[in-house]
Image (spheres, rainbow, N blue to C red):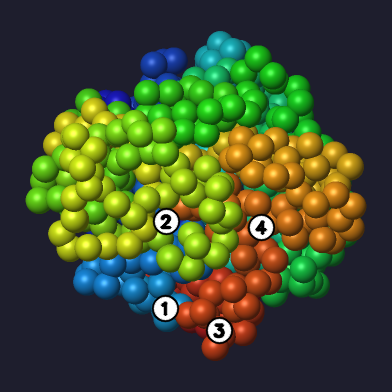
Amino acid sequence: MRKTVIIILAAVFAASCSLDETPYGFYSGDNFYKTEEDAESGLMYAYNALNYLEYLRGIWYVGDIPTDDMYPKSDEPGDIHMLENWTVTSSTELTHYYFKYCYIGINRANAVIEKISSGRFSEAVRKRVVGEAHFLRAWNYFNLVRTFGICPISTKPIASLEQTTSPLASGLMEIYDLIISDCKTADSLLQVNKVFGRTDKVAAEALLSKVYLHLASSKHYGAPSYTDLDYNADDMYANAAIYARKVVQDYPSDYGFDSRLRHIYDVTAPDGPEHIFIMATDRSGTHEGMYTKIPLQFLPNNSSVPIYIKYPDGSLQKGNGNGWGVFLINDDFVEGAYLATDKRRTELLHHSIYDQNGVEITPSPVRGYFTSKYVDPDFIGERTSARPYLIRYSDIALVLAEAAGPAEGYPLVNTIRARAGISPLPSGLSLEDFRRAVINERKLELAFEGNRLFDLRRTASVTSTVQEAASLTEKEAAFYPIPQREVDLNPNVPSTQNN
């Protein structure tokens, strides 16, 4: 990895995203990608873009903070409150960083795809490395198009200053066509290979199902900028169902429902049946990115004395006592969205902390609800193995339910509800009512995992759901503006980009 960093140089300049630093070197095919070890290092370099602090935390900054499920503590500094209050501008730092690191990941994936595809490597290595790189490029572009809409597009690695100003995509579908093509290429090249922190054939099919569902529902519900696109929503639902069905049905020995709700979030089980794509971090790492501080964002502070979370069965789970309590859960979300008996509430959402003897103690300062989805009882100081859940099986099961409708969807949704200890959905729902019920189930099942904003945007329901966005139109809430620094440095991006 160190060799890769030295040769490819720090951040390499994101394709289409002109970074702040003056470039002092570019990737060169003359001095790298000569051996299979080089190929593997280049791929890991592309994966590692996900671990950048601003990109990693962007999962919640972008996916949850602007929604009805989560909000930041009032004294948190920086631009996070612009996301909370729906006052994001082209100068907002947090969205700028998210944009920037998406393109860093894209550029690194582009380098791998170009050099390994034409290099002298074994067929097995070429397929695996290039397939995973296509997945990563699709992943980053999917994050971009859902967050910013029409944005610059590049499929070649940067080798000169002139290449840092990529052209703007002609429209949303040019980006989606690339994402779909990348996912299908990954699907064709990869095998089922469940390895913690890596992607495989199943991950490619899972991502493709999410892409098709986003297109289908955006058109169906009249999401701005999607209504005039030239495709049929029913066809996209059918495509989403095809690929989600593969994930849900074809690989039972590797992927499936985890019957133990809390086990899904056990940091010692990142290879559990639910985990299709989970970030490779571990507390043994030497710097943040190799390990994470995710629990500190969620857990309350106890003057650095470890806290304990008490579960309904009386068991205790140790957690960091030096939490920052940045990400807080809306009271109305907990008490209004979940049934009182829902285990996703009783086991994963908490308002109290305890000492090692199970005696309740008072955090300082007192905060609201927090989630125990991100807790590492074996933390080392601030270093933890808590990881984002990028794609999990239950997500794709709900994609299939929503796309396919009641006949196929009821058993999937009701399995998830049974695991949560609540009754099945009412029988006899119409297709429209059933899909609305599935979207609501996603809200409960995938809370605080970075999905909520995108579900609201694709159903054109941001302004009717999020109080802070009520004064906006759905068109205004559909995308964030492209960062001003990109507008200033890339002449191909107009200052008033309209998606």
> Three-letter amino acid code at disc 3?
Ala
**Distance between mark 4 and mark 3 Cα atoms:** 20 Å
* Vertical side of 377 occupied by 226: above or below: below
Provide the residue designation for mark 4.
Answer: 440
**Distance between mark 2 and mark 3 Cα atoms:** 21 Å
Q: Could you say whether the residue bearing mark 4 is in a helix, strand or loop?
A: helix
Labelled pair 1, 2 in contact (Cβ < 8 Å): no
Residue 128 x/y as whole percent: 57, 21
Q: Could you say whether the residue bearing mark 3 is in a helix, strand or loop?
A: loop
**Would you call the spot at circle 3 few (<14 residues within 10 Å), some (14-19), or many (20 or more)?**
some
Residue 44 x/y as whole percent: 40, 29
Q: Residue at x 25, y 34 (%)?
A: 318
Label located before the other in sequence (4 or 2): 2
Provide the residue designation for mark 1.
Answer: 85
Labelled pair 2, 3 in contact (Cβ < 8 Å): no
**Would you call the spot at circle 1 few (<14 residues within 10 Å), some (14-19), or many (20 or more)?**
some
Q: Could you say whether the residue bearing mark 1 is in a helix, strand or loop?
A: loop
**Distance between mark 4 and mark 1 Cα atoms:** 23 Å
> Three-letter amino acid code at disc 1?
Asn
Provide the residue designation for mark 2.
Answer: 60
Label located before the other in sequence (1 or 2): 2
